[in-house]
Image (tube, rainbow, N blue to C red):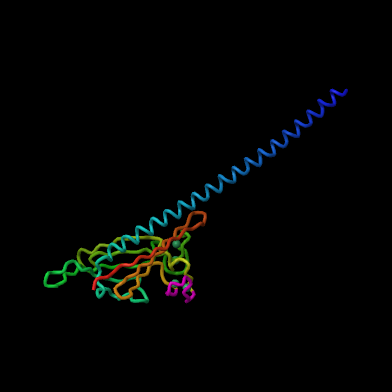
C-alpha cells in the first residue's frame, strides 16, 4: 500500500514534469518563430534600404561626373541659391595656350514626372510614391546628335523630411525643395537628391545624398 502510494506520487510528478517540459518547449519554439519572423522582416527592410542607397549613390555619381568641368557662367538658368531642377550647361572642353576656350555642346538635366505618375497629387501608378519624378540627362541638347538618358526613377517629389507647407522642415535653408535640386553659391555647385522606394506591403526606404562640385570660371 505504501509502495503503491509512492509509485502513484512518482507517476504524478512525471506528468507534472512533462507538462512543464511541454510548456517550456512551446515557449522556446514560440520565441524561435518570433525571432525568425523578426529576422526575416529586418533582412527584407535592410535589403530595400541597400537597394535605394545604391541607386541614389550611383545616380549622384553620374550627375557629378557630368557636371565636373562645367563653367560657372554657362548655366541656363543660373541655379543660384534658389536652385534649379531643370537647366542646361556647357563644359570647358579645352583651353589653348593663348587662353581660348573650346566649349562642349550643351547638356541638360530635367526633372520630369515619372513614367505613369502625372503631377496631380495622386499615386497614379499605385507604386506607393505620390508624384515621384525621373531625372533625365540630355547629351548634345538641340544638336542632331541629341540623346536622352534616364538617370533615375523614383526621385521623391520633395526632398526627404520636407513637407509641402512653405516651411524649411529639414533646416537646410530651402523651403519645400524638390527631391532633386542644384544650387550655386559662388563657384560651388551643390546637388541634393532623394530616392524613395516602396515595398508591396507599404514599407518604404528613402536615401538623401548631397555632393558639392567646384565649377570652372
Ligand atoms: Ca500623380
Ligand atoms: Ca507613384
Ligand atoms: Ca528644406
Ligand atoms: Ca516644407
User: Where is residue 196 shown, x and y percent of the image?
Assistant: 44, 60
Which image quadrant for residue 27? top right
Ligand 2 located in image quadrant: bottom left
Which image quadrant for residue 195? bottom left
User: Where is residue 155 shown, x and y percent of the image?
Assistant: 40, 63
Q: Which residues are magenta?
A: 165-175
Q: Any magenta on residue 168?
A: yes
Q: Any magenta on residue 150?
A: no
User: Where is residue 103 shown, x and y percent of the image?
Assistant: 18, 69
Which residue in the rendered view is the most extreme toward the left? 98
Q: Kindly identify the residue that appears in the image at 28 percent across and 66 percent down.
A: 67
Q: Kindly identify the residue that appears in the image at 37 percent across and 69 percent down.
A: 181
- Magenta-colored segment: predominant secondary structure: loop
User: Where is residue 184 shown, x and y percent of the image?
Assistant: 33, 74
The correct choice, above or below, for 152 with respect to 31 in the image is below
The correct choice, above or below, for 62 with respect to 176 in the image is above
Q: Nearer the viewer, residue 41 or 2?
A: 2
Q: Nearer the viewer, residue 154 or 64?
A: 64
Q: Kindly identify the residue that appears in the image at 25 percent across and 64 percent down.
A: 139
Which image quadrant for residue 79? bottom left
Is 76 left, or right, of 121 in this rendering?
left
Amino acid at each position: 500500500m505504501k509502495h503503491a502510494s509512492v509509485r502513484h506520487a512518482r507517476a504524478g510528478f512525471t506528468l507534472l514534469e512533462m507538462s512543464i517540459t511541454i510548456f517550456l518547449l512551446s515557449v522556446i519554439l514560440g520565441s524561435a518563430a518570433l525571432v525568425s519572423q523578426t529576422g526575416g522582416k529586418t533582412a527584407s527592410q535592410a535589403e530595400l534600404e541597400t537597394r535605394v542607397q545604391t541607386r541614389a549613390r550611383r545616380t549622384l555619381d553620374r550627375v557629378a561626373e557630368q557636371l565636373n568641368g562645367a563653367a560657372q557662367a554657362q548655366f541656363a538658368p543660373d541655379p543660384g541659391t534658389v536652385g534649379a531642377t531643370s537647366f542646361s550647361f556647357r563644359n570647358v572642353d579645352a583651353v589653348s595656350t593663348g587662353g581660348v576656350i573650346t566649349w562642349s555642346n550643351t547638356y541638360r538635366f530635367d526633372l520630369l514626372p515619372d513614367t505613369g505618375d502625372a503631377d496631380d497629387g495622386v499615386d497614379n501608378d499605385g507604386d506607393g510614391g505620390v508624384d515621384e519624378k525621373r531625372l533625365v540627362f540630355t547629351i548634345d541638347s538641340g544638336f542632331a546628335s541629341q540623346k536622352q538618358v534616364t538617370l533615375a526613377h523614383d526621385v521623391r517629389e520633395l526632398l526627404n523630411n520636407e513637407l509641402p507647407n512653405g516651411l524649411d522642415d529639414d533646416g537646410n535653408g530651402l523651403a519645400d525643395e524638390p527631391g532633386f535640386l542644384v544650387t550655386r553659391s559662388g563657384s560651388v555647385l551643390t546637388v541634393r537628391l532623394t530616392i524613395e522606394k516602396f515595398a508591396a506591403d507599404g514599407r518604404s526606404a528613402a536615401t538623401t545624398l548631397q555632393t558639392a562640385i567646384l565649377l570652372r570660371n
